[in-house]
Image (cartoon, grey):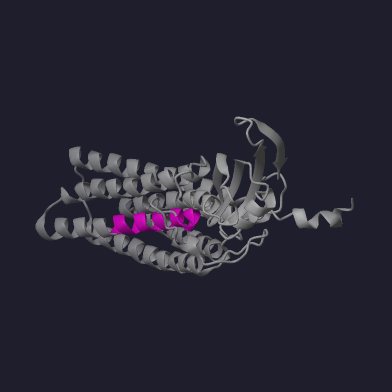
């Protein structure tokens, strides 16, 4: 059989089209963050300012993490058609999000350590200079947040249609901002965004603490705000770790799409007797795309793999569907007959 004759049964394994806007945004934010880091470290060394040096090295961790996000987009795009990735390269982006969350936890731990040290060993603070540094960091992070927010909006407005024999229907997956808070969100972009927000939040808290110390002599407010900021960053990081881990470990069987698959098979009026699902696997292969393997038992001859795929094809988020139909011999007490698989 010539390869051209196999085209009705073959399909692409590129289940996610990537996010070029996010890739460009994270690359630009990385460059801005790295440039600001170099300026602050250079100025801190030149003017002998520990505040500038500390903020500059603090920014280096965010530059590395955001750079990792940009690299993940590029790698996922470069290897998108590599057959070694059985279900596409989208999870490279998710893995990057997980690594960035670990970076965030490290930043939070360093913030706590530095704050506790300041509580037990108070140091004199050059308030005016420190406030200028914090304001500079805040301005840079607001600009970066606006850049990434623009990419975030583009991600939500972008339609990710894949054929694979599925008939179009309403974009109900766009409403699957499920109970896990994932929906079609770009977890890699979310990781980069959280790094920027974490830096912006610490800048705001630092400014408040420095103003309190300068105006009212509340030197204790600086380390207390540092600990509060660390708790906030850690909460964000743990939430990101939870969401990325769920995808990386294929923990998707509580997603609403699983119930929709069961209902679609059970409620199809074209079958005299609804088939019974004996095995079902659902996992995510893209921001809005899932792969499905389902095994059914039935005595109804009209239940074929092609018919089941047609029923499930109404759900366009199901990008890869494999069906096995096990025919039961009527009156055999549940014994199985021939197996038809696809």
Residue appearing at x 66%, y 62% in the figure:
163
Span of residues in magenta: 183-203
- Tell me: 124 left or right of 132: left
Q: Would you place residue 143 above or below residue 239 in this image?
A: below
Residue appearing at x 25%, y 43% in the figure:
115
Q: Which of these two is toward me, 309 or 134?
A: 309
Residue appearing at x 19%, y 43% in the figure:
122
Q: Position of residue 19 (x, y in %)?
A: 56, 62
Q: Which of these two is toward me, 261 or 138?
A: 261
Q: Residue furthest left?
A: 216
Can I make out residue 88 in this image? no
Q: Which of these two is toward me, 171 or 268?
A: 268
Q: Quadrant of residue 117?
A: top left
Quarter of the image with the C terminus in it: top right
Q: Residue furthest front?
A: 331
- Tell me: 162 left or right of 27: right
- Tell me: 234 left or right of 1: left
Q: Position of residue 231 (x, y in %)?
A: 28, 46
Majority SS type along the magenta span: helix
- Tell me: 141 left or right of 309: left
Q: Report if residue 209 lies within the magenta region.
A: no
How many numbered marks does the figure carry?
Answer: 0
Q: Report if residue 196 lies within the magenta region.
A: yes
Q: Position of residue 260 (x, y in %)?
A: 49, 53
Q: Would you place residue 32 above or below residue 242 in this image?
A: below
Residue appearing at x 22%, y 47% in the figure:
223
Q: Position of residue 302 (x, y in %)?
A: 67, 51
Q: Would you place residue 141 above or below residue 67 in this image?
A: below
Can I make out residue 220 in this image? yes
């Amino acid at each position: 059989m010539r390869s051209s004759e196999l085209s009705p049964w073959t399909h692409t394994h590129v289940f996610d089209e990537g996010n070029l806007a996010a890739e460009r945004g994270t690359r630009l934010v990385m460059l801005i963050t790295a440039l600001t880091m170099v300026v602050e470290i250079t100025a801190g060394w030149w003017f002998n300012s520990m505040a500038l040096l500390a903020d500059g090295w603090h920014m280096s961790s965010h530059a590395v993490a955001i750079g990792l996000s940009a690299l993940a987009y590029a790698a996922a795009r470069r290897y998108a058609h590599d057959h070694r990735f059985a279900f596409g390269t989208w999870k490279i982006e998710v893995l990057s999000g997980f690594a960035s969350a670990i970076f965030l936890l490290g930043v939070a731990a360093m913030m706590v350590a530095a704050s506790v040290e300041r509580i037990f060993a108070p140091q004199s603070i050059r308030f005016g200079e420190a406030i200028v540094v914090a304001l500079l960091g805040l301005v840079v992070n607001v600009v970066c947040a606006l850049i990434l927010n623009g990419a975030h909006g583009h991600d939500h407005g972008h339609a990710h249609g894949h054929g694979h024999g599925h008939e179009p229907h309403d974009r109900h997956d766009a409403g699957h901002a499920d109970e896990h808070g994932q929906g079609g969100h770009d977890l890699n972009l979310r990781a980069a965004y959280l790094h920027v927000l974490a830096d912006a939040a610490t800048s705001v808290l630092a400014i408040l603490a420095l103003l309190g110390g300068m105006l009212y002599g509340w030197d204790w407010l600086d380390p207390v705000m540092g600990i509060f900021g660390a708790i906030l960053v850690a909460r964000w990081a743990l939430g990101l770790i939870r969401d990325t881990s769920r995808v990386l470990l294929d923990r998707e069987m509580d997603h609403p799409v699983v119930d929709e698959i069961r209902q679609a098979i059970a409620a199809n009026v074209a079958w005299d007797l609804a088939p019974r699902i004996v095995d079902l696997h659902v996992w995510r292969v893209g921001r809005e795309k899932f792969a499905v393997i389902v095994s059914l038992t039935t005595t109804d001859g009209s239940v074929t793999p092609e018919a089941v795929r047609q029923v499930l094809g109404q759900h366009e988020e199901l990008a890869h569907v494999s069906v096995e139909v096990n025919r039961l011999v009527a009156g055999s007490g549940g014994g199985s007959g021939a197996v038809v698989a696809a």
